[in-house]
Amino acid sequence: MSEERRIQEVLARYVRATDQRAGKAQGALFTDDAVVQSFSKTDSGGHEPVAPPLIGGAAVAYAVDHYMAPHPAGGSSHHVTADHIIEVDGDRAHMNAQFIVFRIQAAARPEEGWADGAFGSQGTVQPIESGYYDTDLRRIDGEWKIVGHRILLDMPYVVPGV
């Protein structure tokens, strides 16, 4: 497997851990001193921080486990990443990828069963977030770890109390 593909797989594991609300799995992708920062797009087209940065994989794990809302019954989220631009320089790498997040809500199965003629997926899929992941990685003992992760959101993002 190429180094570029190994690096892209780190992001694939990151988005799956987010969708599954798996803090330990997501935190394991980061170094102990990694800096993670989310930014909202401003009216002028720039970006401003959403909240103070998270430092280290343990902080990332804690944030996923304690700050992300659990999915409702029948609900989930699905991150899709695309157009990965990856540059590798020895044991350091930089990746920039577009993302979009979908909210999925399954329809509740009626007590009397699905109506005659019902077919296919029952529920809704709605896009809720988009932007870019701008990520720095370092190879440590043969494994790529995230050392810097900037989430550049395309829309304003509000964190209560911040």
Image (spheres, helix red, strand yellow):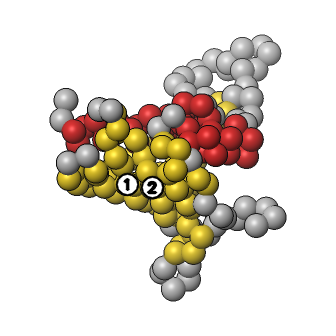
Residue 51 visible in this rendered orientation of the protein: yes
Image coordinates for residue 43, horizontal then vertical, percent: 56, 83
Q: Which residue is mark 2?
A: 148
Report which quarter residue 18 is drawn in.
top right
Q: Residue at x 42, y 46 (%)?
A: 146
Q: Looking at the image, which residue sits at the far top? A: 112
Q: Residue at x 22, y 39 (%)?
A: 3
The answer to which of 96 and 33 lies nearer the viewer is: 33
Return the x and y of residue 63 as percentages of the image width and height. Answer: 67, 45
Marks 1 and 2 in Cβ contact (< 8 Å): yes
Q: Amino acid at mark 2?
A: Gly
**Residue 76: x %, y % from top left:** 62, 34
Image position of 84 (left or right of 121):
left
Q: Please, is residue 50 above or below residue 109 in the view?
A: below
Furthest toward the bottom, the residue is 44
Q: Quadrant of residue 105?
A: top right
Q: How far apart, in angstroms, are the residues tagged by discs 1 and 2?
A: 5 Å
Left or right of residue 144: residue 57: right
**Mark 1 residue type:** Asp
Q: What element does badge 2 sit on?
A: strand
Tell me the tag on residue 136: 1
Q: Residue 154: percent from the left, percent from the top?
A: 51, 66
Tell me which numbered mark, 1 or 2, is placed earlier along the sequence.
1
Crowdedness near tag 2: few (<14), some (14–19) or many (≥20) residues, C-alpha within 10 Å: many
Query: In the image, what residue occupies the spot 62% across and 35% down?
Result: 23
